[in-house]
Amino acid sequence: MPGLVTAIAVAEGDTLEIGQSLVTIEAMKMENILRAGRKARVAKIRPALGDSLSVDDIIMELD
């Protein structure tokens, strides 16, 4: 999803629950909140707060 990372709600190593907020992306003057679709653990967060994302950029890796 192209846009600007405006918030990161989790940290590497966190255990996620279904529906938990992960990251907020601002695109075309709209905020999009990405949420966990399954229980998992955050292995790696790639972008930093304020980074711009392009189409197909990987945002997080989950275990």
Image (cartoon, rainbow, N blue to C red):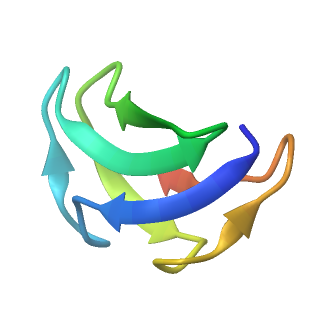
Q: Position of residue 57 (x, y in %)?
A: 79, 52
Q: Front-most of 29 and 38? A: 29
Q: Quadrant of residue 18?
A: top left
Instruction: Please state if 38 lies on the left or on the right of 57 as rendered.
Output: left
Q: Position of residue 27 (x, y in %)?
A: 63, 41
Q: Quadrant of the N terminus?
A: top right
Q: At 31% across and 46% down in the image, what residue appears?
A: 22
Q: Position of residue 51 (x, y in %)?
A: 63, 75
Instruction: Please state if 24 lies on the left or on the right of 20 as rendered.
Output: right
Q: At 23% across and 39% down in the image, what residue appears?
A: 21
Residue 1 visible, this orientation: yes
Residue lying furthest right: 55
Q: Quadrant of residue 52?
A: bottom right
Q: At 76% across and 45% down in the image, what residue appears?
A: 2
Q: How many marks?
A: 0
Q: Front-most of 21 and 6? A: 6
